[in-house]
Image: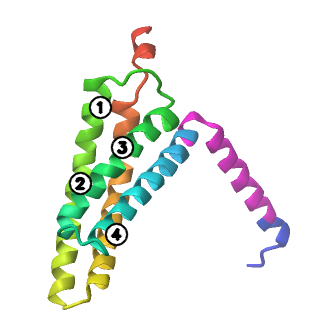
């Protein structure tokens, strides 16, 4: 089948149009902002992990993962709450803070399992500390990416919802 250049341009034009339409929607903006907030929080966690486990050697991979996840959760909460979901004012303890931290612990659990496994495998292979740091940091990053999708759904449907809008119905 021969594809003409105009066919490709039409396809690109339609795709760009759909992408633009999606981004202009509330959900599209939320998804992009959630992704960007997650990237910032993950970069913070990643940097804390690499420095604390790598050159500083503050503890095991698991201990440094706990530290880095706790540090990264702070910007994650505030960026997601205020920027991605547009919430302002005081946080509701039971409806926002508790569920957020519960999900942070789910992410921590997933990353702990993967980091512990990666550290064990890398040390069993007698890799250098730099390579163990690399392997465990990639395991941590992989676990965070997997958890991102589930967290978005929970944030959207349960945590950062507009409770005042629901009451007015």
Q: Mark 1 and 4 residues: CB-CB less than 8 Å, in contact?
A: no
| Residue annotated with mark 3 | 74
| Residue annotated with mark 2 | 108
Magenta region includes residue 22: yes
Label 1, secondary structure: give it.
Answer: helix
| Residue annotated with mark 4 | 50
Q: Mark 4, mark 2: which one is toward the viewer?
A: 4
Give the residues drawn in magenta, as a range: 9-28
Cα separation, mark 1 vs mark 4, equals 27 Å
Q: For residue 7, what is the image quadrant?
A: bottom right
* Residue depicted at x 36% and y 25%: 91
Residue 133 lies, with reference to residue 62, above or below; the image says below
| Residue annotated with mark 1 | 97
Cα separation, mark 3 vs mark 2, equals 14 Å
* Residue depicted at x 32% and y 54%: 147
- Residue at the limit of the structure toward the front, as seen here: 56
Disc 1 residue crowd, few under 14, some 14–19, many 20+, Cα 10 Å: some
Cα separation, mark 4 vs mark 2, equals 16 Å
Which quadrant holds the N terminus? bottom right
Q: Earlier in the sequence, mark 4 or mark 2?
A: 4
**Residue 123: assigned label:** none
């Amino acid at each position: 089948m021969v594809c003409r250049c105009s066919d490709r341009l039409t396809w690109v034009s339609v795709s760009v149009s759909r992408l633009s339409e999606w981004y202009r929607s509330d959900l599209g903006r939320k998804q992009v902002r959630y992704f960007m907030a997650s990237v910032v929080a993950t970069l913070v966690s990643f940097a804390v992990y690499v420095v604390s486990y790598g050159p500083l050697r503050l503890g095991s991979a698991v201990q440094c993962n706990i530290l880095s996840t706790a540090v990264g959760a702070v910007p994650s909460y505030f960026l997601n709450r205020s920027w991605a979901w547009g919430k302002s004012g005081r946080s509701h303890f039971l409806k926002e803070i508790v569920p957020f931290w519960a999900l942070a612990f789910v992410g921590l659990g997933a990353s702990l399992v993967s980091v512990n496994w990666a550290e064990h495998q890398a040390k069993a292979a007698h890799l250098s500390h730099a390579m163990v740091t690399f392997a465990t940091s990639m395991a941590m990053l992989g676990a965070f990416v997997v958890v991102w999708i589930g967290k978005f759904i929970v944030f959207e449907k349960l945590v950062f919802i507009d409770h005042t809008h629901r009451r007015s119905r």
